[in-house]
Amino acid sequence: MKPLDAHDRRILEALQRDAQQPLAELAESVALSRTACWRRIQRLEAEGILEGRVALVNAEKVGLGLTVYVLIKTNQHTEAWSKAFHRVIQDIPEVLESYRMSGEVDYLLKAVVSDMAGYDRLYKKLIAVDLFDVSSSFVMETLKHSTALPLR
């Protein structure tokens, strides 16, 4: 993989701000020709640096106004349990992010639900696998939210 140079970083920053901008505008903003800019984008995609282009949806405006972080502890650390847990997580669309953690918590999940009843439905799906402890924290106010990585 070729190291990122200043042009690559500017392209990535610009695409993180607006992935739908016309190629001509993007190329001009990063001081490249359209062809050179397009080649770089294709290379960044081929190398897996650019993983995809998505639209960001406002969760609250589509009825998913409650964000919850779920901390999970297990006393089972077998491959079979892990596979079962991963299957359960993959089948719950409300779970946006899932991480296996170091420290006192084994897994951290980020989920969005409509309300407390929606969380209860999520919780009942989670406990389909044997869990030792489940603790949840609900977001009261979002102070900062970004999907853009700091590239400089």
Image (spheres, rainbow, N blue to C red):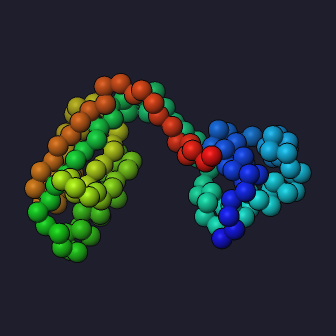
Q: Is residue 93 visible?
A: no
Give me the residue at 81% from left, 40% from top: 29
Q: Measured along the vertical axis of the image, is residue 137 above or below residue 150?
A: above
Res. 35 visible in picture? yes
Residue under the point 59% across and 58% down: 51
Q: Is residue 1 left or right of residue 90?
A: right
Pinpoint residue 134: horizontal percent, then vertical percent: 15, 47
Q: Quadrant of residue 139?
A: top left
* 30 or 124, nearer to the observer: 30
Placement of the N terminus among the 4 image quadrants: bottom right
How far across and down, in percent of the image, does residue 76 sit?
Answer: 13, 67
- Left or right for 44, reference 24: left
The residue at 11%/63% (across/down) is 75
Q: Quadrant of residue 59?
A: top left
Q: Residue furthest bottom?
A: 79
Residue 135 x, y percent position in the rendering: 17, 43
Q: Position of residue 42 (x, y in %)?
A: 74, 62
Considering only vertical position in the picture, is 137 above or below 102? above
117 to 1, vertically: above or below? above
Q: Residue at x 70, y 42 (%)?
A: 14
User: Height in image: 94 above or below 86?
Assistant: above
**How many numbered discs, if any?**
0
Q: Nearer the viewer, residue 7 or 39?
A: 7
